[in-house]
């Protein structure tokens, strides 16, 4: 039952499409979604396949010492609970397991960069054997010099805002 205002022309209320037409519209929408998902899946699987192929080419060209270091890098991970504890102590609040896992991943990359720099320091000095604390300290100093202070979003040498 439609109410009409005085002086207003009465217009018929819009009617729902017949059931057959509504069902056809829903089917058209359903057909597009899986096709889009299939395209995304195909693109993702193609990217994964290319990444694996590139890694295989890289690993085939490793020297035995590089291959051994790479395998050690892949096997080891920072303990997630220990990382989570350090984060919680630093921030003073609870963090989720996925956040701790992400921070552990970044920390692993950071440690890898420091070790690579320490290897270059060791090679430059003509030292042999395992890395020494001096090599690591020098690598960390070089890292700070290149990137600014560690943990900064921008290098220390960048333009400073809000300076008096």
Image (cartoon, helix red, strand yellow):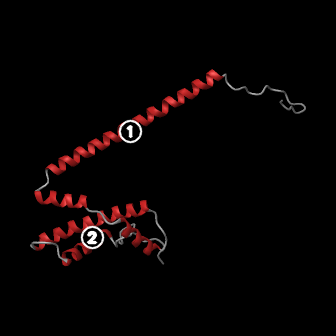
Residue at the spot 25% in from the left edge and 45% down from the top edge = 52
Position of residue 32 measured from the top left corner of the image (x, y, whole percent) = 49, 31
Q: Relative to 88, is 110 on the left or the right?
A: left
* N-term mark: 1 or 2: 1
Determine the secondary structure under disc 1.
helix
Task: Tell which of 18 and 81 is nearer to you.
Answer: 81
**Residue located 27% across and 42% down the image:** 50
Q: Nearer the viewer, residue 99 or 111?
A: 99
Q: Which residue is mark 2?
A: 143
**Residue at horizontal 62%, vertical 25%?**
22
Name the residue tied to disc 1: 41
Q: Quadrant of the N terminus?
A: top right
In this picture, residue 17 sits left or right of residue 87 = right
Q: Position of residue 25 (x, y in %)?
A: 58, 26
Can you tell which quarter of the image residue 142 is in? bottom left
Q: Where in the figure is residue 144, as x and y percent of width and height?
A: 29, 72
Mark 2: give few (<14), some (14-19) or many (20+) Cα within 10 Å: some
Q: Is the residue 85 above or below the residue 14 in the image? A: below
Q: Is residue 93 left or right of residue 47?
A: right
Q: Is 5 placed left or right of 52 in the picture?
A: right
How far, Cα to Cα, is label 1 from label 2? 39 Å
- As drawn, which residue projects farthest toward the right? 6
- Above or below 135: residue 80: above
> Marks 1 and 2: which is nearer the front?
1
Q: Position of residue 34 (x, y in %)?
A: 46, 33
Dot label at residue 107: none
**Local SS, label 2:** helix
Q: Residues within 10 Å of mark 1 (few under 14, many from 20)?
A: few
- The answer to whether mark 1 and mark 2 are in CB contact below 8 A is no
Report the number of discs.
Answer: 2
């Amino acid at each position: 039952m439609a109410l009409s205002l005085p002086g207003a022309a009465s217009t018929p209320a819009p009617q729902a499409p017949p059931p057959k037409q509504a069902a056809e519209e829903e089917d058209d929408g359903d057909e597009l979604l899986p096709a889009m998902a299939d395209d995304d899946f195909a693109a993702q699987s193609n990217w994964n396949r290319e990444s694996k192929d590139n890694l295989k080419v890289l690993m085939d060209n490793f020297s035995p010492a590089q291959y051994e270091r790479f395998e050690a890098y892949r096997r080891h991970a920072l303990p997630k609970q220990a990382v989570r504890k350090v984060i919680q102590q630093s921030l003073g609040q609870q963090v989720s397991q996925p956040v701790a896992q992400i921070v552990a991943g970044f920390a692993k990359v950071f440690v890898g960069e420091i070790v690579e720099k320490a290897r270059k320091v060791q090679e430059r000095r003509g030292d042999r054997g395992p890395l020494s604390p001096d090599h690591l300290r020098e690598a960390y100093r070089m890292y700070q010099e290149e990137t600014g202070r560690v943990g900064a979003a921008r290098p220390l040498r960048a333009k400073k805002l809000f300076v008096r």
